[in-house]
Amino acid sequence: MITERDLDQAHALLGRLRGAIDEVIVGQKAVVDATLIALLCRGNLLLEGVPGLGKTLLVRALASALGLRFSRIQFTPDLMPADILGTNILSEDGGRRQFTYSPGPIFANVVLADEVNRATPKTQSALLEAMEERTVTVGKATYPLEAPFIILATQNPIEMEGTYPLPEAQVDRFLFKVSVGYPSLEDLTVITERNTECAGLALPKPVASAAEVLSAQAVVREIPIAKPLRQYVSRLVLATHPESDHAPKDVKSFVEYGASPRAAIAIILGAKAHALLAEEPNVRKVDIEAVFRPALVHRVILNFKGEAEGVSVPTLLEQVWKETPVL
Amino acid sequence: MFSLSQLERDIARRSRALRGLRGAGMAFAAAVGVVLAASVAIRFGAFAPRLALSLGALLFIALAVLVGYLVGRARRPSISRLLLSIDLALATGERLSSLHELRSRGAALPLQKRIEEILTQAPPAWRRVLRIRRTEVFPWVAGGVALALAIFLAVTIAPPVPATAADPGEVSRISSKGTAVSPSDSSEAESDGISARRLDPGQAEPALPLVDTLAEILPAPPSRGLLGALADEEVAQGSPPARDPREALSELLSQLMSRGQTDPRQSFALTEQEKTALRDLLQDLPGSGLRQSLSSLLSGETGDALKDQIAESKRLLDSLNQSAEGEGNAQVDGAPGDRKTDASEDGSGSIGWVPPATSAEGNTGSAGGGERQSGTKLDGPGMEDELAPPLNDEGGTAAGSAGPGEESASPPGVGFVPEDLLGSLGAGGDMRRFFTKGIPFEPPAEERGSAAVLSLDYETLRALLVARAVAPDVQALVRTYFEKITQGGP
């Protein structure tokens, strides 16, 4: 049960975080919002964009603003799971040798998995348990991850040579997939000014604590959503399934697999977090619309025909959105 | 303070009323559709209109509306959906539906409070959403239009037409084919009077030789046609016109001849009443020959001598009438083209029947009664053929055993006037039926060869007329007609 104070604190926290990130990141409001929403929803975020757009900087700024433990893992083809999760090492304690667990970089509050698609699927799969269960199992021991925990992964969409597409199971564990676009002319001008005039780009100072983040995460779950809107979200997700009666014609033609139930959860949780970000006391249709595409775009798998004809998933999602009635 | 409970009650009440209205509208439209279909069926004669049927239709519609309203109202609306629809329509940020959700969960009081504060500051005008829309109005409008149409049909439905009435198509067929009438159409034979009245003047053929023959023996105003003149006279039956002495004499002589034919006794003599009438007429008659002949009738002769004297007097009178009417008949006979033109112009035509303005029902009834009397003899399949003289290639009839010997009894050109004729029609209506059945439409040229041949000769017809107690004048007229159309032949 949340209180008025919790609600006010959550609003205040989000305001401070946004302000802190805005000191470093110019523009990219949708990306920043998606990052904050993922944080509030206890989710993970996949950022996709060409190099140099500030993906890594965003994650670092968020971690810095949160004042939480941050770790960065640069994924490369030779990266091993133990390099991420940690491993048991033989140690000597008072003449007695024993295996002790040495935690990997995954043990942090904010983890940046940079260019995650460059690691092998085996290494990529090392993140699965951490992303979903917030635990790490090494040998026979399972170690919980400290809350709040969030993995922010980045991947480059154009340098596909030597990369390994993420397995569907792992992709589905990302709350959102956000494409980071080029900044606008004004934003780019400000970016150049900030990076060339001053001594250097300073990361923001911590403006939040882990407790405040956890409290905000609890508030998000209390944000009400009307039952018909919840049904609407279910219909939206079902409409991405080619075998569904709710599916538009193109979905039936070009989609192999639709979104999983995680997508519906992601939409509703994301909509709640979006409402909290907007300081609204309840979920609105616009909140659902704001998170609908990033929550589904990586969960819809095209079939061969769709791939061959170059069908874009965002276009299909647009059709789903337009053709699914609220009531 | 905003009260969601009150709002939910109001919305539910309003929604149920609207659902009831929608249900009632749909039921109304459906019921009116049924009634309209019934009206159309009545219009096309599927069943007869009755007052009870109209009242039942109104009751049916009212009942359907009531049931539709109750059924529509009985459906319980989903409050959360209603609230969300109001939210979406009014762009309230889905606060009403979210508040409903929060209250049903009984949690998140701070959020509930905030939503209520917002709603208190800007109460949603939900009545704008739950108003009567086109979907509710359309069934009523459609049903109203259909109902108006049904009422229009009910009001404009003609009174039940007697089963004997032939339809216009049948009448047209009769007028164009003449004797070729469907044998099975007995109702047509029963209501030839009505059929004749319904003849389309545009489709009638006014220049028919046989009709001209009728016009010769029954002179009628050319502009109205023969039957038109008869109708006019029938209208004026209430005040019979002053009669010409010669016409009265002719009628009297005909009656005497008729009586003489039926009385074979040698003691056949004039009654005192007949003698008195003859004396009265004798005073006004010109012509010494005729006066002498008539005077000899009063001399007390009996038997065949009296009959011969009567026939002689009749012949003299007819000759006198012929010479006197020469000019008038010449006007009729000499300008058939004019007659045709007039007939076609006034729309009645020489075969057209102007419906009498009065006593229409009486005529119809009496005609029907006459048919019942005649029974199978007149209603048979060949009735039209029997009474309409078939035509040979020369335009004459193939029937008729009226031999030359009978010509002397009724010489051509008897010259009946409608007044005399109508004066002896009586109330039976036989005359009219006789005339209408006897209207000799000419078949089209290509059908003449195959047209049905009249098997009725004059003697048969005369027996028929006698059996039906047709007045002697009319019998004489028929005979003259037969003679005219056969031009003295068999």
Image: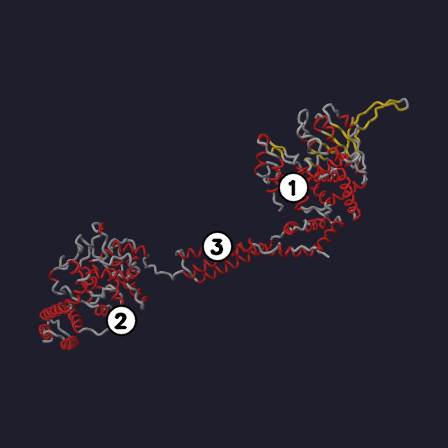
Q: Residues within 10 Å of mark 1 (few under 14, many from 20)?
A: some
Q: CA distance from mark 1 to mark 3?
A: 41 Å
Q: Locate residue A285: give its quadrant.
A: top right
The amino acid pointed to by label 1 is: Ser
Q: CA distance from mark 3 to mark 2?
A: 51 Å
The image shows residue A164 at horizontal and vertical percentages of 68, 26
Q: Earlier in the sequence, mark 3 or mark 2?
A: 3
Do the residues under discs 1 and 2 have CB atoms within 8 angstroms?
Answer: no
Query: For residue B33, which numbered disc appears in the image?
Result: 3
The amino acid pointed to by label 2 is: Gln
Q: Residues at marks 1 and 2, common chain? A: no
In the image, what residue occupies the spot 32% across and 59% down? B165
In the image, is A221 to the left or to the right of A302?
A: right
The image shows residue A309 at horizontal and vertical percentages of 57, 31
Q: CA distance from mark 1 to mark 2?
A: 92 Å
Q: Locate residue A221: give its quadrant.
A: top right
Q: Chain of mark 1?
A: A
Q: Residues within 10 Å of mark 2 (few under 14, many from 20)?
A: few
Query: For residue A234, which numbered disc appears in the image?
Result: 1
Q: Nearer the viewer, mark 1 or mark 3?
A: 1
Measured along the vertical axis of the image, is residue B430 above or below residue B75? below
Q: Chain of mark 3?
A: B
Mark 2 lies on residue: B237
In the image, what residue occupies the spot 17% across and 65% down? B329
In the image, is B84 to the left or to the right of B112?
A: left
- Nearer-the-camera pick, A263 or B368: A263
